[in-house]
Amino acid sequence: MTTSEPQRAYVWIWLPAATEPVVAGVLEARADTVFFNYGRSYLERPEAIPVYSELPLQPGRQRPAAGLRVAGCISDAAPDAWGQRVILHRLLGRAGRETDPAELGLLTYLLASGSDRVGALDFQARSDRYEPRSVSATLEEMVTAAERLEAGEVFSAALDDVLLNGSSIGGARPKVLLDDGPRKLIAKFSSRTDTYPVVKAEGAAMHLARYTGVDAAKVEVTECLAHDVLLVDRFDRTSVPGERRLLVSALTILGLDEMMGRYATYHELADDIRARFTNPKATLQELFRRIVFNICVGNTDDHARNHAAFWDRTQLTLTPAYDICPQPRAGGETAQAMAIGRDGARLSQLATCLAAAPVYLLDPGQARDLISQVVDAIRTHWPEAADAARLTAAERAQMESRQILNPYAFEGYEAGTG
């Protein structure tokens, strides 16, 4: 860490049903480890809850779990690839384009990113006063700023400020946060490097997910300055102004970090659901339905950051599904990001799901019924979902049988037997 790196950042939290944050504790960076310490005033609050179970309510410095350099619930609130790129430009100008993101420490990213981040945490340099970092801007301004950053062009400080909204949101693609009256939205933009209509494909899949019974975030596909834009309703905000909901990623639930993310599995997440989630049986069925749907629409980017749960202080509740994006493919064998069965099976096939059904407390008949519901709904509602996502006839034809209901998904699976 360089001498210019901050050594400390205060963690502010929105407690359940609260509309204003309070200081929960402090992060301290020491060598390659970030420690956490609850504040005494927070511990004395009768309504205080653990930031997450990995940070129990107790005095004293807490080291992250073995193998982690920072607690997962803190990492979940940190900027990802796109946000890091925005912050590098904000702090270093055009030189940031050639800078390795690892040259800045975690606390720099936490303190420099926007305050309206996913979940109910924020980070401040002070403990006595909360100062939100956010800028109001139009969608047109946001699209313009993102486009110029991607192109490596010089742009004004005002446009630089616009990108602060969205710098704390995960993912590698251009995105910002947007308020549309009472609606809180994440706006995702098409990129100049896209080789297929990524934004519209995700929009179609998200619409389709809801038709199949998947509890998925509401979305809308629109256009701005010749860019496709996907508007995603935020489920970490409520109808009460100022209220936020705590959540953690499946990566954190499984006790892993990005470097260990390849070891995340659906079957281990299912074990956690049985032990720690509200309504575990229904949640396991929902998870199984999401796995089947991902396979049926060619979404192989279903890694552990793309699953999350709300946290209330003792239990977890699965959030609506998000980031369901069909991936480009020409056919043939492919696999999901996380293993589905306890044998490590991850091939993107319905037969894999059927074999793993007991993990999700489903018998073969129940699993087949659920698979049939998903497949039939996709076949029935694909035209509506494609229309809602503004896919052209050529674009939808390209997706059909490549991503949507790819023949490989059905190999080895007989719907009416077993």
Image: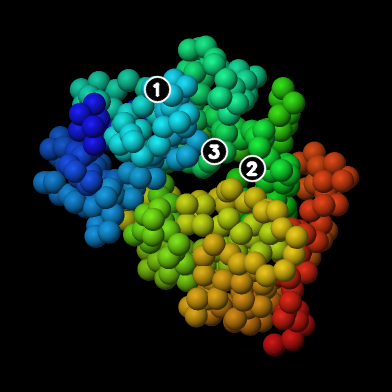
Q: Which residue is mark 2?
A: 218
The answer to which quarter of the image holds residue 226 is top right
Q: x and y percent of residue 136 in the render?
A: 51, 17
Counting residues from the start of the chain, the first of labels 2 and 1 encountered is 1
Q: Seen from this angle, which residue lies furthest right? A: 393
Quadrant in which the N terminus is drawn? top left
* Residue type for callout 3: Arg
Labels 3 and 1: the sequence-earlier one: 1
Q: Residue at x 76, y 79 (%)?
A: 415
Mark 2: secondary structure: loop
Q: Rounded to the nearest whole Å, what is the CA distance between mark 3 and mark 2?
A: 8 Å
Q: Position of residue 202 (x, y in %)?
A: 68, 46
Q: Is residue 243 visible?
A: no
Q: Circle 1 — which element?
A: helix
Q: Where does label 3 land, which residue?
A: 234
Q: Which residue is mark 1?
A: 92
Q: Position of residue 366 (x, y in %)?
A: 64, 77
Look at the picture and state if 336 lies above or below 182: below
Q: Residues within 10 Å of mark 2 (few under 14, many from 20)?
A: some
**27 to the left or right of 348:** left
Asked where in the image residue 155 lies, by quadrant, the reply is: top right
Residue density around tag 1, few if under 14, some if 14–19, many if 20 or more, within 10 Å:
few
Foreground disc of the pair 3, 1: 1
Residue at x 68% of width, y 40% of height: 194
Q: Position of residue 211 (x, y in %)?
A: 72, 54
Residue in the image at 61% along x and 35% along y: 188
Q: Amino acid at mark 2?
A: Lys
Using residue 327 as the reference point, say whether residue 50 is left or right of it.
left
Q: For the point 66% across and 81% down, which residue is it?
A: 365
